[in-house]
Image (tube, rainbow, N blue to C red):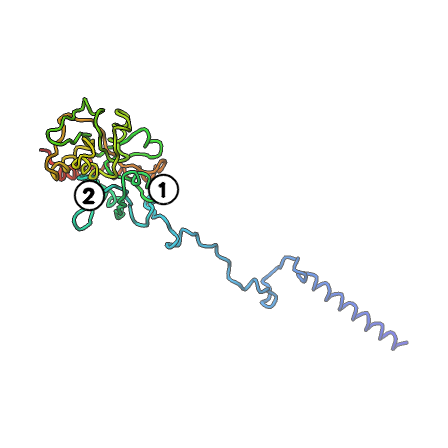
Amino acid sequence: MKTWKKLAALLLALSMAFALAACSNSQGGDGTAEPTGTPPVETQGAEDTQPPETEPADATDDPAGQTAEPAGDFTTVAQGKLTMSTNAAFPPYEMTTDSGDFEGIDVEIATAIAEKLGLELDILDTDFDSALLAVNQGKSDMVMAGVSITDDRLLVMDFSETYATGIQVVIVKEGSDVTLDNLGEKMIGVQKGTTGWSYCTDDYGEEHVTAYDNGLTAVQALVSGKVDCVVIDNAPAQEFVKANDGLTILDTEYANEDYSIGVDKGNTALLDAINGALKELIDSGKVQEIIDKYIPAN
């Protein structure tokens, strides 16, 4: 009997020990209980030993993936550059030197604007129509090519403040019977896409107008007798007459217009930056200095 009582006591002690062990394991053993202290190292899962995940880098942080260079509140189509589309056959506003470099009123003003914006000027030289389209196609930031503001252009472009005044004139051969009164009876050469083209087609009809890719080609057509006259801005007209014996300019002006810088419609941030730089250049007298360099007051 004593032996059985001893055995019963031993079994009771073992049962209490197992019960205590089970109570201890129920706290946090299945991962659902809140730990009350720092868990032992051996109980931490593998995921706890990994470094915290970092957010993926923004695509714009990668210079190789950038398509525009931030400069203040605006962007440009090429990194670190201000791209100007133009037609470099419109002296003295834009033209090429014998070495192939660009020069002219628009080129120097654009260079000064780019410098004020902390950018480098890049020039896209193409025909006049393509120069206008380039700002809408994301190929250039602005167009400067003796561009005047028209209702049609305002539909797709925004314009800066005026920086120069243009006068449309008529180039004829010396001794020609062409006058402003009989232009509608003649064949008129113009540069394609310009206001000269618009004015002449509106006034006299397309059958009396031949459009050329640039002013030089139109003047060559006049020299060879393919057209009777050329309507073009006075400044390049003076240059073409100097370079071609036997040509002259009619005394009466054909039209007056102002020149501005064109940007893509709605690109307000870039336009504001350009206008700010342009105003500084005008107020300082720099713009007039550039114009006087190419078009002397006399």
Q: Position of residue 9 (x, y in %)?
A: 83, 72
Name the foreground residue: 274 vs 55.
Answer: 274
| Quarter of the rendering containing residue 185 | top left
- Name the outermost residue toward the right: 1
| Res 165 visible | no
What is the distance, in whole Å, between disc 1 and disc 2 at their CAs? 23 Å
Q: Residue at x 26, y 39 (%)?
A: 213
Q: Residue at x 16, y 35 (%)?
A: 237
Q: Which residue is mark 2?
A: 95
Q: Which residue is mark 1?
A: 137
Q: Position of residue 216 (x, y in %)?
A: 19, 39
Name the foreground residue: 148 vs 288.
Answer: 148
**Relative to 24, does residue 59 appear above or below in the rendering?**
above
**Relative to 161, does residue 112 appear above or below in the rendering?**
below
- Name the outermost residue toward the front: 225
SS at circle 2? strand
Q: Position of residue 222 (x, y in %)?
A: 18, 35
| Res 241 visible | yes
Q: Is residue 4 left or right of residue 156?
A: right
Q: Quadrant of the C terminus?
A: top left
Tell me, yes or no, whether the two marked residues, 1 and 2, touch with CB atoms within 8 Å.
no
SS at circle 1? loop
